[in-house]
């Protein structure tokens, strides 16, 4: 019975709650029912889907834009002032191709403070994007980055560095009406 309730909670989250054009209702459900930790002034916009309850922690001033898939099975930790653009996919679980039973495995993903992920980028299990790193639109990030690095491509490789001399102070929190 517990499994059915868990699956129903996830179905309601991904099919109904994520489509409600009210931040307050969505955040209430994500915090209270899905057991996500979401800091002040952080938002999850419409159309995002998740793979299980728990496993998501967001700092303050961060945003997950519309239509992202966040695989919370292996846990996702999002720092402060992180911007995740539309249709980003963050995976924390896969299968071991060398296992005779194709055993599943989970690896946490961490996005440190001031990270920016471009539209339709994909972050694979076990990756850490270090402070102020940028993953360009359409990138497939297969390994962890250095702080202030800009990565792009398939697989993503460092193409340049952001200035580490400047103090990044932007606030990624914004909530659009009906989003």
Image (cartoon, rainbow, N blue to C red):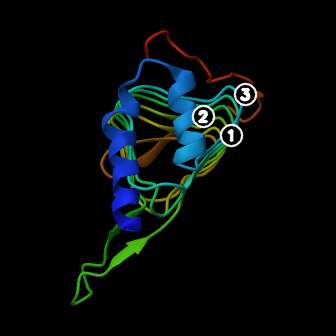
Residue at screen point 52% across, 37% down: 29
How far apart marks 2 and 3 lie (CA) works out to 11 Å
Residue at screen point 61% across, 31% down: 62
Rate crowding at label 2 as few (under 14), some (14 to 19) or many (20 or more) other CA atoms within 10 Å. many
Residue at which label 1 appears: 59
Q: From the top left corner, tell me how far across and down residue 138 is, in percent.
A: 32, 37
**Residue 6 lies in what quarter of the image?**
bottom left
Decide if residue 60 is on the left or right side of residue 111.
right
Residue at which label 2 appears: 82
The quadrant of the image that shows the N terminus is bottom left
Residue at the left extreme of this rendering: 100
Residue at which label 3 appears: 168
Report whether residue 83 is seen.
no
Residue 146 - label: none
Contact flag, marks 2 and 1 (Cβ < 8 Å): yes
Mark 2 or mark 1: whose residue is earlier in sequence: 1
How far apart marks 2 and 1 lie (CA) works out to 8 Å
Nearer the observer, disc 2 or disc 1? 1
In front here: 58 or 30? 30
Contact flag, marks 3 and 1 (Cβ < 8 Å): no
């Amino acid at each position: 019975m517990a499994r059915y309730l868990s699956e129903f909670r996830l179905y309601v989250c991904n099919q109904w709650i994520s489509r409600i054009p009210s931040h307050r209702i969505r955040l209430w459900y994500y915090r209270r029912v899905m057991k996500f930790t979401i800091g002040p002034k952080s938002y999850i916009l419409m159309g995002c889907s998740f793979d299980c309850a728990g496993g998501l922690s967001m700092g303050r001033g961060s945003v997950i834009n519309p239509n992202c898939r966040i695989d919370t099975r292996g846990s996702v930790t999002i720092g402060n002032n992180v911007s995740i653009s539309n249709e980003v996919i963050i995976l924390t679980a896969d299968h071991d191709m060398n296992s005779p039973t194709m055993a599943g495995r989970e690896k946490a993903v961490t996005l440190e403070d001031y990270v920016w992920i471009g539209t339709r980028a994909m972050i694979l299990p076990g990756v850490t994007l270090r402070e102020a790193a940028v993953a360009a639109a359409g990138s497939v990030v297969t390994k962890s980055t250095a702080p202030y690095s800009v990565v792009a491509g398939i697989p993503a490789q460092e193409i340049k560095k952001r200035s580490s001399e400047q103090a990044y102070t932007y606030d990624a929190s914004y909530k659009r009406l009906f989003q």
